[in-house]
Image (cartoon, rainbow, N blue to C red):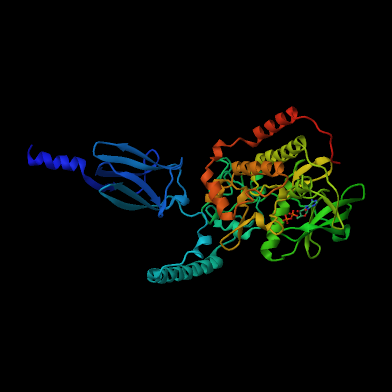
Amino acid sequence: MSNWHWSSLLFCFLVPPTIVKLEEPARYHDTCILFTVRGSPLPTLRWFHDNKELTPNKYVHPDVDYYKDDIEGCLTFKNPTHFNNGNYTLEATNYLGVVTSSVHGHFLNMPFPDSVTAETPKPQEDAFGVFIAVGLATFACVILVILFLLINKYGRRSKFNIKGPGAVMNVEENSTSPLHHVNHGVISPCALDNGSDSVVIGLSRIPIIENPQYFRHGHNCSKPTTYVHHIKQRDIVLKRELGEGAFGKVFLAECYNLSPTKKMLVAVKTLKDLTLAARKDFQHEAELLTNLQHEHIVKFYGVCVDGDPLIMVFEYMKHGDLNKFLRAHGPDAMMLVDGQPLQTNGELGLVQMLQIASQIAAGMIYLASQHFVHRDLATRNCLVGNGLLVKIGDFGMSRDIYSTDYYRVGGHTMLPIRWMPPESIMYRKFTTESDVWSFGVILWEIFTYGKQPWFQLANNEVIECITQGRREPQQRLIIKDIQQKLFALMKAAPVYLDILG
Ligand code: ADP
């Protein structure tokens, strides 16, 4: 046997591992980190993500082909998100040695960059970069201020304050209202029929979403008149406090001259913050509510602007918000009188739960028909009246009383992440389909008698769980079909004695 044969035999049987190829993630059929490893005997492989060993799962796993003297493969990612960003290290081992090699993978930006910057200390070496960035930002600010002054001097404001195409603003940061009209995915206030019902929203900036009434009538850009009914202050007599909302306190009141039967009970919402922006929001909200009329949307009677505070007048829903109601009719609920248990309120049965759900679905079908995306559907935002009548009752966020239901992002934004689908959390994409997701969470709330979704998890863990779930909006049923299914279940369910008045 010649020397050549000996060395090649040795090469075949005794070769320490080498990683001959490890490429940055690239998109083929799936996203993939391609690699080739040599060694004899063939090495065993382990993967690490940011130094933590990777356990293969259906979202990240190696696909490997073994050949005579090398291993070729691909670390495969299915729909990677920002959670998959980081360093990927491949370790190859045989009894002659161990080698490692790393690549960096960047798949998606963090959905909430603001919220993490505070926690991520900047390395010292970045000081120069920071200095340059601050310099550039200052320069940009100066230019912006000059532009702003020029626009203010020479620019003309639209008569109805409608922003032009491409106008963006931090709606989340500034608006108290989560109810937004989705203008068929188009920012221009004039365009009407442009296909999809969705609007893709950037990571921290959201295209301005206009009052639906600007679009409802005709194709011109002028704002049709919405006559908000005005109620006189002397016609409202406050009786007692019902709760506290984002705008201000909510009271039970008697209202005169609203109906032919002289006086009626109403719920009045007060506006505590009288900034100009808050007044504008108030006006917007009132116009919007005036035009929303459906048996499963709370009735809006009008506004009272005679004095301070500003007031919105709604129909009074005797049993208050649905979350409280569910908790009060769960297995653990007790009526307490002077701190002593008195009686239970009566537990909700299956049929009643289905009745509650199908009424919310009916309200949602109406909202979808009006091209409204609610964005904050949850039991806390539904109201319960006599005879188990349920209505979607809140188009301003109940952030104050249910503050733990919201997650603060960056400075001011509060998001109801526990009710939000992956695409809303990651890209702030809010659509009729994202409302359907929230309805799924509402069903869970109803059937757990008002528990907080993911109650066992902290907000960041909730975000991780939901975004790893990856259920596509297209895979969701439409609300009409869901309502049909609820009706079918109701028909099939055994009938219990009605325990609620
Ligand atoms: P906001 O929208 O300003 O956050 P909410 O609508 O959440 O305020 O109101 C706060 C609380 O007031 C609710 O949780 C509910 O208990 C009570 N409430 C609000 N509207 C009504 C109503 N129409 N009828 C009876 N109670 C109401």
* Residue toward you, 252 or 447: 447
- Of all residues shown, which one is farthest toward the front? 95
Foreground: 191 or 44?
Answer: 44
Residue 176: image quadrant is bottom right
Q: Residue at (74%, 31%) from the top-left corner? A: 490
Q: Is residue 234 visible?
A: yes
Q: Position of residue 72 (x, y in %)?
A: 30, 40
In the image, 16 versus 462, the foreground residue is: 16
Displayed quadrant of residue 4: top left
* Relative height, residue 221 to residue 4 (above, below): below
The residue that appears at 42% across and 71% down in the rendered structure is 135
Q: Quadrant of the N terminus?
A: top left
Image coordinates of residue 298 in percent, x first then y, are 77, 46
Locate residue 368, reporting x and y percent: 65, 40
Relative to 68, say whether 202 is above or below.
Answer: below
User: Residue 98 at what x, y percent from top left?
Assistant: 29, 51
Question: Splitting the image into 4 quarters, where does residue 172 fall?
Answer: bottom right
Q: Is residue 463 left or right of residue 483?
A: left
